[in-house]
Amino acid sequence: MPSVHPRDIAAVAVRALTSDGHERKTYHLTGPEALSVGEQVDILSEVLGRRIEYVPITDEVARKGMEKAGMPALLIDALIPFATFIRSGRAAEVLPTVEEVTSRPALTFLDWAREHAEAFR
């Protein structure tokens, strides 16, 4: 999935709200690269300087964990199909919108991970 950096969301919003030519437009935002969860975990491992292991689980195990954590059934029932959709690869499209609107390349997951490394320590 091409995770979009929060600063890119803000940059597009600022441009759309403070300059002409964005009236009645809708912008679909993505990050500049589609990464699997495993690839994201590898990037976090690199940034933190320690090995983090990604262990995929079944939807059934995920559901039980969410139920045990007290998540509402309605939310669980929405998240399980969403996870299936993500795993299918159908959410992997990378769009050039951030660069088109801001005139600069979109920030990467690695950029985000470096900026937030302390939150994971």
Image: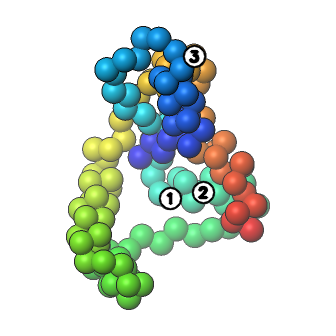
The residue identified by callout 1 is 38
Q: Are marks 3 and 2 in contact (CB under 8 Å)?
A: no
Amino acid found under the numbered disc labelled 2? Asp
Residue 31 versus residue 1 in the image, above or below: above
| Foreground disc of the pair 3, 1 | 3
Amino acid found under the numbered disc labelled 1? Gly
Residue 70 versus residue 30 in the image, above or below: below
Residue at x 71% of width, y 48% of height: 115
From the viewer's perspective, tell me whether residue 105 is left or right of residue 47. Answer: left
The residue identified by callout 2 is 42
Residue 56's image quarter?
bottom left
Residue 50: x %, y % from top left: 73, 66
Question: From this viewpoint, which residue is outermost toward the top?
Answer: 21
Q: Secondary structure at mark 3?
A: loop
The residue identified by callout 3 is 103
From the viewer's perspective, tell me whether residue 12 is left or right of residue 89. Answer: right
Task: Categorize mark 3 by other alpha carbons within 10 Å: few (<14), some (14-19), many (20+).
Answer: few
Q: Secondary structure at mark 2?
A: helix
Q: Are marks 2 and 1 in contact (CB under 8 Å)?
A: yes
* Camera-side residue of 21 and 89: 21
* 3D distance between C-alphas at marks 3 and 1: 30 Å
Residue 99 in view: no
Q: Secondary structure at mark 1?
A: helix
Residue 30: x %, y % from top left: 44, 36
Amino acid found under the numbered disc labelled 3? Ser
Task: Categorize mark 2 by other alpha carbons within 10 Å: few (<14), some (14-19), many (20+).
Answer: some
Which numbered marker is on residue 101?
none
* 3D distance between C-alphas at marks 2 and 1: 6 Å
Residue 113 versus residue 94 in the image, above or below: below
